[in-house]
Image (spheres, rainbow, N blue to C red):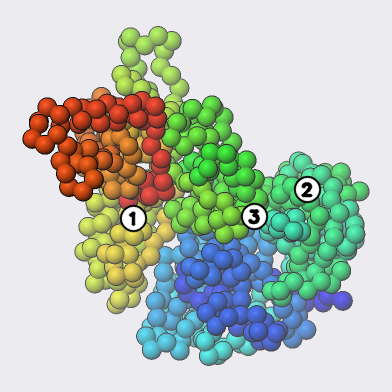
Amino acid sequence: PPPPPERTRNYAIIAHVDHGKSSLASRLLEFTAPQSSAMAREDVAVMDTLAVEQERGITVKASAASQLHRGHLLNFVDTPGHADFSHEVARALEAVQGGLILFDASQGVQAQSFKVFEQARERGLRLIPVLTKTDLPAARPLEVALSVAECFPQFDPDEILLTSAREGEGVEAVLDAVVDLIPPPPPPPPEYGDQARLRARVVDSWFEPLRGVVCLLQVLTGSLAENVRGSVVAGDAASPAFSVQEVGLVLPARLRTGALGPGQMGYAIVGARDPRVARPGGVLVLERDAADALREEALLLKGGAAPAGRAASVLYASVHPVESDGFDELQGAVDKLALNDVGLSVELQSRGAGDAAGGGGGAFLGPGLKVGFQGLLHMEIFRQRLTDEFGVDALVTSPKVKYEIKFQASAGRKGGTPEPIAVEDLSDWPPIGEKFDVYEPMVQMRILAPVDNAGSVMELVSKRRGTDMTTQVIDERTWIFKSRMPWAEVVTDFHDELKNATAGYASYDTVDDGVQKGALAKVELALNGDVVDVLSFVAHTDVAPSQGRSVCAKLKDVLPRQQFPVAIQAKIGNQIIARETVRPYRKDVLTTGGSKSVGGGDVSRKKKLLEKQKKGKKRALAMSDGKVTLSQAAFTAVISR
């Protein structure tokens, strides 16, 4: 039987990226379940189960496991550290009462350290500070402990725990601190009537081709057994009923137990093929209790509890199949991937396949989906997971942010001034002749970087139109740089340029900060005279011409050669600001076998052959409608402009 709720501890491990979360999680599991050591390769953390996590060495999905220590049941969640996956951190923190906040003993406080601390503080969680990697030659635990106390006055430097996952040092002290300092789960809310009735929060869910939908559950009240009929209630809706086929614990390997009791966190295979039946954030109840559960959820929402939902996307891109007949397969894979990635928002195409807006790619890409992401890395991981987990190759266009268009009053306008509009797809950009102002989303940027690179950081921020620059000293090695910056300048290649400017030592995080009027222009990219909106972009008027020339030059290198010339043009309004040409394949028609020249010295014969070849190229262009095959490299060229 599971320990009573007062002997249950739910906690998360949070930190900046690469501060040792997954490594420490693996050692914690090995201490309480030695068999876990046999499950881990030497170079892969036990909790990183996705192929993309093992390949890149980063955590992109929060994963949970259970432990027993000193007669207590410990349920913990290992969370991602990159800013693009902060929605995973937020979701994990909703299911716990405390956490371990980690700091690298050599790198010290980083940008995401502030972000995850603020997320935990908003929820009133009990945090335990831990220094990791204390065995490294570059470790400076005393200095880092003092800087942690300086940045976070709640922490006493003498109480910060020292650990080394590689050497296994400090692991037991961490587990003891979890038992002693993190409070047990609170009693169920008063809106819940019968405490014996099953209520289990859906912490996570995913789709497996052989078993269907699998849920990670946290039992709030009652108990969950196999072979019962259940339903997931979220907000004012209940999912279709399903049969619970298998129940067990996650250690992190699955251990089938047949039942889960109050306070336990485990998995359930629910025998459903539709990924939408078990969205994370919902509450699983027995089918016969669904109506009562809906009334309870309504009372909770009326009392101020936030409904489960998806994270708001911060940039958008169109996703298209590589093969023209692969749209249905792509749509099914994206739906299943979106089941356990609350950072994704997916919209079906709402217009014809010949239109580039609403997810269509026009004549160049065909139909697709409009997908919202949390950042560039999130977009890259999404594309790689489609390939790794579903075998689907997809083209993801360059990202776009949401702009606000406010039209100016015009005496010649019929029907008055239109209402302001939000533009995500650039095909919705106002046509030439309209008078309007463009408002772009802004963010407050916080950069932590070595003081030796202060000049490079300030120069980069200024180049990216950052304003209101301030600095703050953390310690003798690290400064904080704060600035207000357009979000569109961040989602291109700001991360790469910042890493290059600081030899990889800088980190940053952002907070939304409204919108600001900007001098912006849409730069249209055209191939053989046809505008390709999925390649077009918005830039500040001062740099739009140079960026247009840069993109044209890069597209020339990545677009495949055809039997006809491909004209690449960049234009603002009616003005062409750049042009490049992809030269066609060309057969040497002036020579026959060997090196013999056609026509000898007769120039008219040679001109006739060249003119015939030229007409053939024109026929090829007309028959193909000038259609050019776009690759992922073409969209990468726009991102790195």
Residue highlighted by disc 1: 494
Determine whether the residue tagged by mark 1 lies in a helix, strand or loop: helix
Q: Amino acid at mark 3?
A: Asn
> In x, y percent, where is residue 467?
28, 50
Q: Residue at x 53, y 43 (%)?
A: 323
Residue 263 seen anywhere in this rendered image of the structure = yes
Residue highlighted by disc 3: 340
Q: Which mark is residue 233?
A: 2
Nearest-to-viewer mark from 2 and 3: 3
Q: Residue at x 81, y 71 (%)?
A: 256
> In x, y percent, where is residue 429?
39, 28
Determine whether the residue tagged by mark 3 lies in a helix, strand or loop: loop
Where is the N terminus found, in terms of image quarters?
A: bottom right
Q: Amino acid at mark 2?
A: Val
Rendered position, 615 above or below 496: above
How many angstroms separate mark 1 from mark 3 (CA)? Answer: 28 Å
CB contact under 8 Å: marks 1 and 2: no
Q: Residue at x 50, y 45 (%)?
A: 322
Which one is nearer the viewer's eye here, 581 or 462?
Answer: 581
How many angstroms separate mark 1 from mark 2 (CA)? Answer: 41 Å
Left or right: 505 as drawn, with respect to 71: left
How many angstroms separate mark 2 from mark 3 (CA)? Answer: 16 Å
Left or right: 268 as drawn, with respect to 582: right
